[in-house]
Amino acid sequence: MRLPIGIVGERRNPLTYRFLRRALDEPGLSVRWFAESDCAAPFPTDDRKAYGLAMNVLERLRRLVVPADPHRVDCRRLCRGLGIPYLVPRDQSINTGLPPPMYEMPQVDHVLLAGCSQILDARGRRLARGAILNYHYGPLPAYRGKYVLFWQWYRGERAIGHTFHIVDEGIDTGEPVWQGTVPVLPGEPLDTLTGRVLDEGAARLGEAFACLAEGRRNIFPVPPHPSRYPARKFLAEITATPDRTIAQMREVMLRLGYFRLPNGLRIRRIVRTDEGVPGRIAIDRHGITIPLADGTLTGALSMHTPFWIHAALLGRRRVLASLGEPHSRG
């Protein structure tokens, strides 16, 4: 008999998509519904809205030239093609936005959270008759919180730990059911490593549910030291602020492929650096110049699109205003 489960995740999240595909292929599982957990909150300022609009325009222009990828990650398309109910909470909350009968008379024995950033409260945890299982990128109880695969890779761990755990009222505090590790290869970029960890985690999905059903556990013999990494710690590490150095931001760019400005924009290409030169935030046709502790750095938002196109779409004044600068310079 196949175990009925529900899945909660994000529509275009590669983690969610891999686990959904794997659950559909597992002979012991039956996916009864999928609930979208995307937090589609608007940008906090008009400047970020303008950036989002500009990126949409560039994406539409790109699609006119580059054919659509038929293999693009899309959980909604996959579910609808197979006749699986695809649910979008009316208020974006998994705890309150699904049809009331789903909380009162659950349709599934268990729920899998895969790529879900929401915290389930007591009502949300009633979506299943039994335990709710979450997939986490860390070797719990170490590396709780957000972006923990990044922290393990960035801090030079030799292997990435990952965990299936039962969801309780805390943040990554539920009992681990299954844990494993994926070795880090020398010089391996984060994107490649992430893909391998995702593949390994998805491949263990059936085993994790078997452990849950049989009451057994596959966990590390010696629990790692507890630790938690909040999102703000990750953002502080990758954000260019006046107290960071040119070398630090080059290192972030080299290892991650981008660094972040305080307004949330991502710099994906370093145009030039000027060590020992004091400066202020400025914009020219090449990019955004930002002051750092030991000089200035000029960066662009894209590896491929010339910055003057971004500046024209966004507006120089608007970009500078979002960075805290009242006037256009450069």
Image (spheres, rainbow, N blue to C red):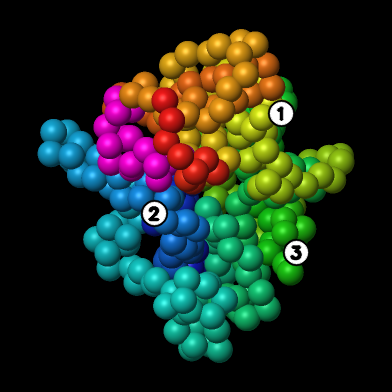
Q: Whole-Å distance between the Cαs marked 3 and 1?
A: 34 Å
Q: Which of the 4 image quadrants contains residue 250?
A: top right
> Which residue sits at x=47%, y=29%?
282
> Which residue sits at x=56%, y=28%?
280
Give the amino acid type for the residue marked by disc 1 in the picture.
Asp
Pair 2/3: label in front: 2
Q: Whole-Å distance between the Cαs marked 1 and 2?
A: 28 Å
Magenta-tinted stretch: 306-320
Q: On the image, numbered disc 2 is attached to which residue?
A: 49
> Which residue sits at x=54%, y=80%?
96
Q: Which comes sooner in the sequence, label 3 or label 1? A: 3
- How many C-alpha atoms fall within 10 Å of the one at disc 3: few (<14), some, or many (≥20)? few
Closer to us: 88 or 269: 269
Q: On the image, numbered disc 1 is attached to which residue?
A: 243
Q: On the image, numbered disc 3 is attached to which residue?
A: 170
Q: Can residue 162 be seen in this view?
A: no
Measured as percent of width and height from the top left, residue 76 is found at 32, 60
- How many C-alpha atoms fall within 10 Å of the one at disc 1: few (<14), some, or many (≥20)? few
Give the amino acid type for the residue marked by disc 3 in the picture.
Gly
Position of 157 with respect to 130 (left or right) is right
> Which residue sits at x=37%, y=38%?
316
Position of 59 with respect to 139 (left or right) is left
Position of 66 with respect to 308 (left or right) is left
